[in-house]
Amino acid sequence: MSRAGTVNAALLAVLIGGAIAAHLAGELFVVTLATKAAIFALAGVGLNFALGYGGLISFGHAAFFGLGGYVTGILASHAMSGEPLTTLPYTMNGTNEMLAIWPMAMLVCGLAALAIGALSLRTSGVYFIMVTLAFAQMIYWFAVGWPRYGGEDGLSFYVRNVFPGVNSMQPLTWFAICTGLLLLALVFTATVMRARFGLALQAARRNPQRTVAVGIRPFGIRLTAFVLSAMITGLAGSLYADLNRFVSPAMLNWHMSGEIMVFVILGGVGRLTGPVAGAMLFVAMEHLLGGVSEYWPALLGLVLLGIVLFAPGGIVGILTGGRRRV
Amino acid sequence: MTPLLEVAGLTAGYGPVQALFGVDLTVTEGEVVALMGRNGMGKTTTIGAVMRLLPAAGTLRFDGRDLLSLPPHRAARLGLGLVPEGRRCFAPLTVAENLTVAARPGPWDAARIGRLFPRLTERRRQPARTLSGGEQQMLAIARALMTNPRLLILDEATEGLAPVVRQEIWSAIRELKTEGLAILLVDKSLRELKALADRAVVLERGETVWAGPVQDLTDEMTDRWLGV
């Protein structure tokens, strides 16, 4: 196994091993923390797809994280109340089946990303950052101003949605579901990035003109990457809603976009398991330091500064000790 | 016979600065054409305009199709294979990955590239940025060939390379010529160009000043236009 492969396996072993150890020790809260880290990691894997591999610095991924969350919350609350979601053009009921909610959340996020991406990818650099931010804030303010689903107060649902054959309320089971999806997303990312599409995406990040000269239009592959990225982050948003059994506009806020970006940068931009490392460190710091002082993000800021200045490859870059391959 | 590439009265520039004032140039199937001229006379600009990487006006046709109305990636897909000046591979990707990105169906595949440049096969898994200059140049040519072009455009393919490596590149280009690939060539080595090219087109100040069989280039002409 290559050095990078060893680091990837080790990071996942820490996450999974930590959760199992906590379960055996009866520390159920730690299992939930590990679940939160897995979900944040999944959101980061989504962003890394566009930002790390495609060089698309999206500052609006909270839009997809939040949309995934809202789709979940809305479907679950309708399932609870028994009131149909819509009766036109045909009756559509809510659902509390994760296997039905996930595709729906990903579909909504994919369509949103298609619209947002088609417009924002016409710009680049700082304008791209600002346009993605603007779209996310639009959705945020829409959620704040829409009383039907709780507006600013958010939307609660009291029972976690169900997964066939298991009890999703059991912390370790729920952790296994979330981590399973994280692993799938990692395998998907690794596979895509080795395929022609992924290679072209990375080539276009380095030099769009050169990819044009070999007959590839960067816009198309970038838009595809943006949509796939949004779908992964949207799935994470769905899980996050289920973790808390609550969604609120905070999931859509630009703070959230920033946090997802922090997972990626802390862990290593364009590194496969970078977001896993970043999310674990973030959750650990939030838990350990958050108890000491409410100003813990100041320390997080220092860590982030240190990483950006001295280890641009993030945690994974430090562990593998090499330049990033892609 | 309709020319493969037909350029007439081509003008192009960089923003407000016009660089080409009327370039005429044709390449027919199976022909090797040398694009010549001193530094700054518009050779690379012409190539950029042909590849549709620069805004241009005039007549620009490839196999009878108007290139100016096409977006650049479509123009490239018609069969224009560019080996840009200064090598410019996809540095972080490995040799094999560089080739995969460009691959388009046709007779050129990784195996055939391996026969042309055995060194690239040895370095398959190495990132392009770790290759020597000559190897990067081979990779840039290989990448262009992987698109299965009908016209290969080489911009200063042997610039800045050791003499031994230059000879390797030249012999590869000769082999491509023997196979009947049309090639548009920019290079500083007059001796090699004369040995290889069928025709020459000379640019001066962004205009075609001479075009004809390469043997017809007299010393007086090369002194005047190429300053050697």
Image (spheres, rainbow, N blue to C red):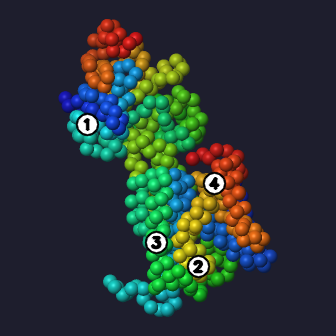
Q: Which residue is mark 1?
A: B57
Q: Residue at x 52, y 61 (%)?
A: A59
* Chain under numbered label 1: B
The chain ID associated with circle 2 is A
Q: Is residue A94 visible?
A: no
First along the sequence among labels 2 and 3: 3
Between marks 4 and 3, how big is the CA–CA gap? 29 Å
Q: State the residue position of label 4.
A: A268
The residue at which mark 3 appears reads as A139
Query: Which corner quadrant holds the N terminus of chain B?
Result: top left
- Using the numbered discs, state the Cα–Cα distance from disc 1 to disc 2 in whole angstroms: 59 Å
Q: Amino acid under label 1?
A: Ala
- Of residue A114 and residue B138, the one placed in the foreground of this image is A114
Q: Position of residue B173 (x, y in %)?
A: 41, 25
Q: Are marks 4 and 1 on the same chain?
A: no
Quadrant into which the C terminus of chain B falls: top left
x, y percentage for residue B57? Answer: 25, 36
Determine the CA span between mark 4 and mark 1.
Answer: 45 Å
**Residue at (33% x, 7% y) in the render:** B219
Marks 2 and 3, how far apart at CA = 20 Å
Query: In the visual, does B177 lie left or right of B135?
Result: left
Chain of residue at mark 3: A
